[in-house]
Structure formats: structure tokens, C-alpha cells
Amino acid sequence: MNLFIGILGMVCILVAFILDEFYKKWNQNTIQYNVFNMIGSGLLVWYAFVSVVWPFVILNVVWFGVAGYKLVSILRRKRR
């Protein structure tokens, strides 16, 4: 089950990356891009934590935080 969670997290991040880099559908200023990055990195935090891979835990905690910060700033901007 943990492997499935890790793969799902990886897929979320790769979908956001591919839709940004190759198809220009999403970018760092879209809600979808940041939501997928948050979901993906959150799942990868869990996977890395249960696998006891601390550098990967730290990387994905930071990734989650940055995506969350960006998402909040986008939502605040849309309210105005």
C-alpha cells in the first residue's frame, strides 16, 4: 500500500510538470498546478517517512510548503 501511495504522489507531481513544460496548460500561477504539487508532495512525504528516507521527507515537506504558500497567494489575489 505504501508503494501505491508513493507512486500516486509521483504521478501527481509529474502530471503538473508535464502539463506545464510540454503543453503549457498549467503553470506555477494556476490553482490546479499547485494543488497537484501539494497532493503529490504530501503523499511522497508519507512514503518517504514510512520508508525512513529523511532527505526525501525534507525535500517534499518544503515542496508541499512552497506549493501551499503559492496556492494561498493565488486564492487571495482572486478574492480581490
Image (tube, rainbow, N blue to C red):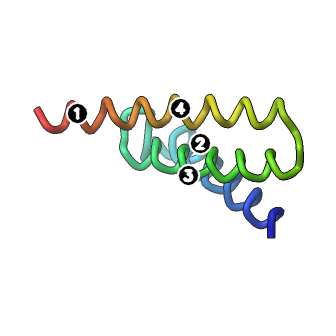
Mark 3 residue element = helix
Q: Residue at x 49, y 35 (%)?
A: 67
Q: Which residue is mark 4?
A: 65
> Three-letter amino acid code at disc 4?
Gly
Mark 2 residue element = helix
> Three-letter amino acid code at disc 3?
Ile
Q: Earlier in the sequence, mark 4 or mark 3?
A: 3
Mark 1 residue element = helix
> How far is disc 2 from disc 4 in space, using C-alphas?
17 Å
Q: Which residue is mark 2?
A: 17
Q: Residue at x 41, y 49 (%)?
A: 32
Residue 33 is situated, as x and y percent measured from the top left of the image, at: 46, 44
Q: Which residue is mark 3?
A: 39
Q: Residues within 10 Å of mark 3 (few under 14, many from 20)?
A: some
Question: Mark 3 or mark 2, which is nearer to you?
Answer: 3
> Three-letter amino acid code at disc 2?
Phe
Q: Residue at x 34, y 35 (%)?
A: 72
Residue 11 marker: none
Q: Are the residues flagged by discs 2 and 4 in contact, CB closer than 8 Å?
A: no
> How far is disc 1 from disc 3 in space, using C-alphas?
20 Å
Depth check: 46 or 30 in front? 46
Q: Residues within 10 Å of mark 2 (few under 14, many from 20)?
A: some
Mark 4 residue element = helix
Q: Residues within 10 Å of mark 1 (few under 14, many from 20)?
A: few
Query: Which residue is most to the right?
Result: 52
Q: Which residue is mark 1?
A: 76
Q: Earlier in the sequence, mark 3 or mark 2?
A: 2
Query: Which residue is most to the left?
Result: 80
Image quarter hosting the N terminus: bottom right
Q: Residues within 10 Å of mark 4 (few under 14, many from 20)?
A: some
